[in-house]
Image: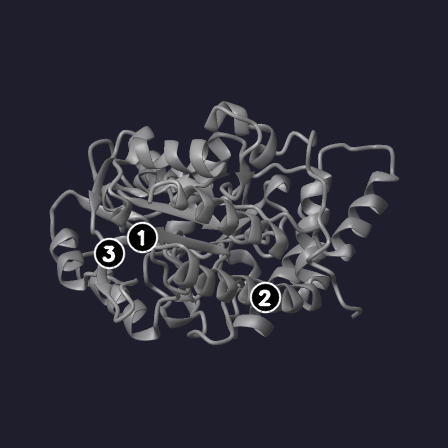
Amino acid sequence: MSHIDFDQPVNRENTHAVKLDAREAVFGRADVLPVWVADMDFAAPQAVTDALSERARHPVYGYTMFPDSLYGAMRDWFRQRHQWSFQREWVLMAPGVVPSLNAACMAYTHLGDEVIIQPPVYPPFFSSVRQTGRQVLENPLLAEKQEDGSLYYRMNLAHLEQCAARPQAKMLVLCSPHNPIGRVWSEAELTAVLDICRRHNLVLLSDEIHCDLVFSDSHRHHMLAALARPDDQLITAIAPSKTFNIPGLGLSAMVIANSGLRQKMADVLESFHMPQSNPFSVTGFEAGYRHGGPWLDQLMDYLQANRDFVVNQVAQRLPGIKVSAPEGTYLMWLDCRALGLDDTGLKRWFVEQAGVGMNLGVSFGANGSGFMRLNIGCPRATLEQVVERIQAALGTRQ
């Protein structure tokens, strides 16, 4: 495969992209550098674009089935990339991982039941529980300070055991790799989580949408299902959306080996007619898994260089801000607490003084207060501008 120039900017203006065209609504001004929403500013693999163009040339866009070739491409990908094999009949298609979270709450819990999450974590983990009438039960991650002042997060397994033992606790939703802190959980950590769920009869949904975005100098990603037993109450949520930058196509899958668990989920999906898709979602999904590997390999080299650039620049040029190198994802978790601003003031400072649009950390949970989430899935030049703007804004605080 020829070299891909990820430094080449792609103009996304006026494409109805949330990341760009919603800036004024979210930040109050349309000229902030957009490094917030978790999609990338890179063109999708050419194979995906070619497949979509070919499908578009057929002029009928009717109701569309999920072909055997789609399941085959997905199974091949996970067998080759993650040494995880699963059967075709274990797979349920869904219109995205977030709808799957809501569906899981409805399928496996009742009104008033508790669902365990591990903040700071992706905001829909909170909303999917609350919007379905369930209760959030927080098992906050532990933040350990490193020699350079940055933080390294671990699971609080002892507290997780206490949460799981509560009579109303029925389900745990795991983020693996973790958004926003970028941890790639170790085999020992994941095995401990499985043991806790078995002891307390918890259903476990593992959101592994970032599983392909792991840096070469970090731990290997372990698919939780590859460590599980056949009778474990486990749902694995996967999608090519983050891997190949196609989240707008809106298609994901759940792999559920447990037949009873799978039927409960199927019943919920059918009740909302959710398994239906569209021809472009099907085409993009299959093309990514079938042909996107070489593109992903180059992407990860570029993202790792972006990550290292940000770590270096923050340490050298941005006093009052700390960051540790994530093990996976294209998201970085900036510790801005030393700036001495409350969360409202922190967001306003980044927008009004620095002109940078990031996600406010407190939206990921109370223990995200004082943090900001930075999306590094963009050309290096954008990150250079981000650093320059923040450095200049810090200079005015001297």
Q: Residues within 10 Å of mark 1 (few under 14, many from 20)?
A: some
Quadrant containing the N terminus in the rendered view: bottom right
- Discs 2, 3 touching: Cβ within 8 Å: no
- Looking at the image, residue 183 lies above or below residue 94: below
Q: Quadrant of the C terminus?
A: top left
Q: Residue 118: x and y, percent?
A: 27, 51
Q: Nearest the camera: 211 or 264?
A: 211
Tag 1: amino acid: Gly
Badge 2: few (under 14), some or many (20 or more) residues near its Cα, within 10 Å?
A: many
- Between 111 and 297, the one lying in front of the other is 297
- CA neighbours of label 3 inside 10 A, class few (<14), some (14 to 19), many (20+): many
| Lower sequence index among marks 1 and 2 | 2
Q: Earlier in the sequence, mark 2 or mark 3?
A: 3
Locate residue 161, reporting x and y percent.
Answer: 15, 59
Horizontal side of residue 150 vs 241, given as left or right: left
Question: Which percent across, then down, holds residue 25?
Answer: 50, 23
Residue found 49% across the figure and 67% down from its top: 308
Res 295 visible: yes
Numbered circle sitting on residue 141 = 3
Q: Which mark is residue 300?
A: 2
Residue 165 placed where, x, y %? 12, 53
Asked if one can make out residue 68 in the rendered structure from this viewpoint, the answer is no
Please state the total of marks drawn on the protein image: 3
Side of 257 where 365 appears, left or right: left
Query: How far is the residue under mark 2 from the one under mark 3?
Result: 26 Å
Identify the amino acid type marked 2.
Met
Nearer the observer: mark 1 or 3; the answer is 1
Can you identify the residue that label 1 sits on?
320
Kindly indicate whether the residue at mark 3 contacts the one at mark 1 (C-beta within 8 angstroms): no
Residue type at numbered disc 3: Leu
